[in-house]
């Protein structure tokens, strides 16, 4: 069953609810935020790790160089791929 997180009290609610079972606030905000989040991830086709804004600082600290390393690695791969395809033809 799909669940929606209440933005007001962070309680997980079943998707069938329109209002939070815990605090009674509308869950539509959470639905919109979730849809926006999904759109954001769809727009990014590069398979690098995500850094969430709500993540603790220390987690961002180690994730950032990892993300850079992944980006550099993917750039090198695409360069190699383009060189390989240009020499084949
Ligand atoms: Zn709530």
Image (spheres, rainbow, N blue to C red):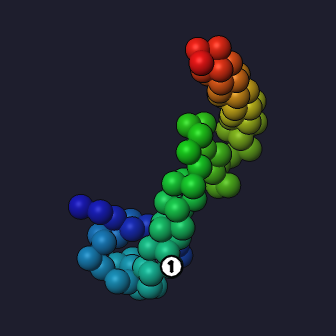
Residue 15 can be seen in this image: yes
**Image quarter for residue 84?**
top right
Spot occupied by residue 56 in the image (x, y as percentages of width and height): 68, 46
Residue 44 position, x and y percent, is 59, 49
Q: Please name the residue shown 33% across and 64% down the image.
A: 3
x and y percent of residue 57 in the render? 74, 44
Residue drawn at x 65%, y 20% as measured from the top left: 86
Q: Would you name the residue on which mark 1 appears?
A: 29
Relative to 25, say whether 88 is above or below. above
Label 1 neighbour load within 10 Å: few <14, some 14-19, many 20+: some
Residue at (59% x, 18% y) in the render: 89
Image vertical order of residue 8 relative to residue 40, above or below: below
Callout 1: helix, strand or loop? helix
Identify the image quadrant of the N terminus: bottom left
Residue 24 coordinates in the image, percent (x, y): 41, 85
Q: Look at the numbered disc 1 and say if its residue's Cβ is closer than 8 Å to ligand 1.
A: no
Would you say 10 lies left or right of 71 here?
A: left
Closest to the observer, 27 or 35: 35
- The answer to whether any part of residue 10 appears in the image is no
Residue 74 image-quadrant placement: top right
């Amino acid at each position: 069953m799909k669940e929606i997180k209440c933005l007001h009290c962070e309680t997980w609610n079943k998707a069938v609810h329109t209002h939070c079972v815990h605090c009674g606030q509308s869950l539509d905000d959470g639905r919109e935020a979730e849809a926006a989040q999904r759109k954001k991830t769809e727009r990014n086709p590069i398979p690098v790790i995500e850094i969430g804004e709500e993540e603790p600082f220390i987690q961002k600290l180690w994730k950032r160089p990892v993300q850079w390393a992944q980006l550099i690695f993917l750039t090198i791969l695409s360069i190699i791929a383009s060189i390989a395809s240009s020499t084949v033809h």
